[in-house]
Image (spheres, grey):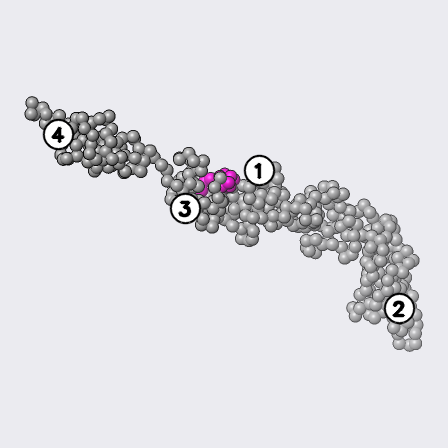
Amino acid sequence: MGRTATDTVSGFVDTQTEVVIEGPAEAATVPGPRPTISGTAEPGATVVVSIDGTEVGSVVADAAGLWSVRADSDLAEGTHTVGAVSTDAAGNVATDDGTFSVSATLDSDGDGLVDTDECPSEPCRDSDMDGTPDYLDPDDDEDGVPTALECPMPSACADSDADTTPDYLDPDDDGDGILTVDEGSGTVDTDADGFPDHLDVDDDGDGLETRNECPSEPCRDTDTDGTPDYLDPDDDGDNIPTTREIADSRGTTEDVDGDGDDNWLDADADGEAPGDREEGIGDSDMDGIPDYLDPMPVVTPDAGVDGGTSDGGTTDGGTPSDGGTAVDAATGDAGTDVDAGETSNGGFAGGAGCAAGGSGGHTTLALLMLGWLVRRRRED
């Protein structure tokens, strides 16, 4: 800066003082409309600062001789003059002056936002607290996505999570609890839905929001496969997609076996072996509930043979299966006569021989008939 100094003699001891304006530098362009004027002077001296001939403040230099005064109103765009007058305790006076400019279009970091917007007042904003003020920082929130990409239209910067903090100043753009820098800073789209993870509230597209699948660090990994649930389309590792398990659960309950784990977080959702992977999504009993969510046993009907029912053991009291011929239950060896026209008295047809049900009854009856035929031939 162009500087002048005036020394005032007072007695024979203290004959001079000093003042120097150090900021803004001579002919510099300031980032905001309210710059701070700073400099040095004799410790304890009073410094009066003016801009364009109008006093804007008065301050006493500290023990190190440092002082600063901030403009008290917005300055118009263009060049301005600044002056400082210092007076010490002995009445000695010193002055300094200079010039600086205010620009409404200067964009020092080239991020598309003018300095006056990124530094509306001093001290200038430093959103990510990295020591570089926003107007000089191309990535204001240090999330790995340049400010120019997060705010391509300065008049309407995006606010993806509607939290009133625009994305270029928000370290968690989608508000899902996972920092943008940890979600790939725009380079990762886990579910390939066209929205990068840092702007996607459901990163894996399984129907569960990321914030719910990772409520706190470290993020949950139900199947311990090394992929946290919020990035895993099959959270419990049962080979049934989480989206399918959520949809199927609408037809039953979210925790079929009542063990406290939702079906999509439970590798054996119905609580009966085998697990979901083995039972699969089929519906063996055609009841509308897939096997992996169905704790009821599969019912297998019998073959329709006398002496057998669907429960595999209860007999029907001996009703003959041949339309009229029944086995006389008086004896049970292969040589016993078989009454050809009488119904069974509840003995053999409904007893041990046929209690096994199904094909077992047929086999026993066939053996008896064979024995009877052999005996008749011998008698003949």
> Gap between marks 2 and 1, in whole Å?
69 Å
Q: Tell me the distance, in whole angstroms, between the alpha carbons under discs 1 and 3.
A: 34 Å
Q: Secondary structure at mark 3?
A: loop
The residue beneath circle 3 is 271
Image mark for residue 87: 2
Residue ID for mark 4: 337
- Taking the image as shown, residue 288 lies to the left or right of residue 368, namely right
Q: Is residue 319 above or below residue 223?
A: above
Q: What amino acid is found at the position of numbered circle 1 in the picture?
A: Ala
User: Element type at marker 2?
Assistant: strand
Query: Is 376 or 147 nearer to us in this picture?
Result: 376
Which amino acid does the dot numbered 3 rest on? Answer: Gly
Q: Are discs 2 and 1 less than 8 Å apart at CB?
A: no
**Local crowd size for mark 3, using a 10 Å CA cut-off: few (<14), some (14–19), many (≥20):** some
- Residue 26 shows in the view: no
Q: Earlier in the sequence, mark 1 or mark 3?
A: 1
Residue type at numbered disc 2 = Thr
Q: Amino acid at mark 4?
A: Asp
Q: Are marks 1 and 3 in contact (CB under 8 Å)?
A: no
In the image, residue 318 sits, relative to residue 213, either above or below, namely above
Q: CA distance from mark 4 to mark 2?
A: 141 Å
Label whose residue precedes the other's in the sequence (2 or 1): 2
Residue bearing mark 1: 192
Per the rendered image, the range of residues in magenta is 238-250
User: Quick one: label 4 or label 2, which is nearer the N terminus?
Assistant: 2
